[in-house]
Image (tube, rainbow, N blue to C red):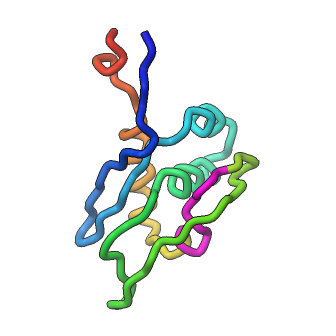
Amino acid sequence: MVIARSLSECVEYIDTNTTFYIRPLRHRVMLRMHELDDADQVELLIRAGISGWKNMQHNGVPIDSAHETASIGGIEVLNALSLESFDALPLTIITKLSHEILRVNQVTEEQAGN
C-alpha cells in the first residue's frame, strides 16, 4: 500500500497569541535527520518544518518570518526558515515546536492501513 502525503498542507500550532504553521517534512529530511547531533536536529526540524507564523512579537514589535535555501548539518533545505527568523524564536518555543513537528510528521498505524 502506498501512503501519499501532501507536502503543501500545513498544520496550525498555537502558543499564547502566536500561530505557527507546521509543514510536512520531506522524506529525505526525516531519514537524514538521525545522522545529525541534537542541536542540528532541532535546527533542521524548526527551519524545515515551520512555514511561517502569525502574530509573533518581541516587545510589542511584529516579527515576520523569512525563508531561504539553507544547508543544515549538510542537508540542503529549500525554503527553510531564515537563520535570522530562527534566531528570533525564544528557546522555550523552539523546544515545543520541535516536538510538535515530529508529532505532525509521524504516520500512525491507522493512517498506514496496518
Q: Position of residue 17 (x, y in %)?
A: 24, 72
Q: Nearer the viewer, residue 41 or 60?
A: 60
The image quadrant where one finds the C terminus is: top left
Instruction: Look at 72% across and 55% down and name the residue there.
Output: 71
Q: Position of residue 55 (x, y in %)?
A: 30, 75
Instruction: Look at 66% across and 46% down and name the residue there.
Output: 37
Q: Is residue 48 magenta?
A: no
Furthest-bottom residue in this view: 60
How many dots with numbers?
Answer: 0
Q: Which residues are magenta?
A: 77-86
Q: Position of residue 23 (x, y in %)?
A: 43, 48
Say if 63 sits above or below 72 in the image: below
Q: Is residue 78 magenta?
A: yes
Q: Nearer the viewer, residue 105 or 96?
A: 105
Q: Quadrant of residue 1?
A: top left
Q: Quadrant of residue 47?
A: bottom right
Q: Nearer the viewer, residue 32 or 10?
A: 10
Q: Position of residue 85 (x, y in %)?
A: 53, 72
Instruction: Look at 46% across and 57% down and name the residue there.
Output: 50
Q: Nearer the viewer, residue 14 or 38?
A: 14
Instruction: Look at 42% across and 80% down and name the residue there.
Output: 63
Say if 34 sits above or below 59 in the image: above
